[in-house]
Image (spheres, rainbow, N blue to C red):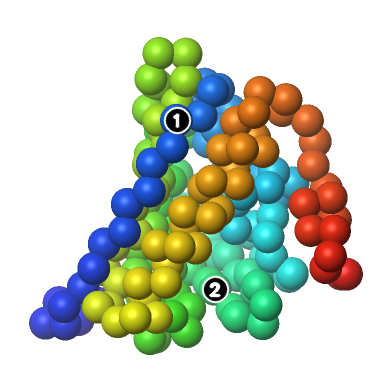
Amino acid sequence: MNKSKKTIEIKVQRTIPAPPDEVYDAWLNPKIPGNPWNAAEKFILDPKVDGLFYWTLEGTSHYGRFTELERPGRIQHTWMSPNTLGYESIVTLTFKQHGEDTLMTLVHSDLPEHELARGHENGWNYFVGVFCEQFGNGSRKQYRWEEAHPSVKK
């Protein structure tokens, strides 16, 4: 991003009752509600360094490239969507042992200071909240997209 433009950063944290390796793996598993891949109407996911992702939700495309994957502690990728106004931003997730739980922190940085970009705060709080409720409830059951989205037909 052009550093002469003013940017904002969004930070979302949740404590998840599972060890970091399980939380890390679940975040990249499209079967687990709360991660962006699960919510997608259509997605491509190649979780490796320099691997690309693409997903759409309600007709809005999101895409980027994985830049760091350090299991079980860190995931980082670029992020672009119409709400970043064409600028590339950075999403960093960390997973830290917190007793028997994991403190999951998502930081979305280099967002342009604009109302559309500020909307990512609501979006990430929603996703991470659902992830914490669904995966973090201790059940670790397998989920299907249709079960998490009963009103949407694929």
Q: Could you tell whether 4 is left or right of 86 in the image?
A: left
* Residue occupied by mark 1: 15
Closer to the observer: label 2 or label 1?
1
- Considering depth in this image, is 67 or 23 the residue closer to the camera? 23
Residue shown at the point (67%, 38%) measured from the top left = 134
**Vertical arrangement, residue 99 with respect to residue 82, above or below:** above
Secondary structure beneath disc 1? strand
Q: Could you tell whether 25 is left or right of 142 in the image?
A: left
Instruction: Say what amino acid the circle numbered 1 marks.
Output: Thr
Measuring from the top left, give residue 7's x and y in whole percent: 21, 73
Q: Is residue 67 visible?
A: no
Q: In which quarter of the image is the N terminus?
A: bottom left
Secondary structure beneath disc 2? strand
Determine which of the numbered discs, if any, sits on residue 88 in the image.
Answer: none
- Considering depth in this image, is 133 or 107 the residue closer to the camera? 133
Measuring from the top left, give residue 64's x and y in whole percent: 48, 68
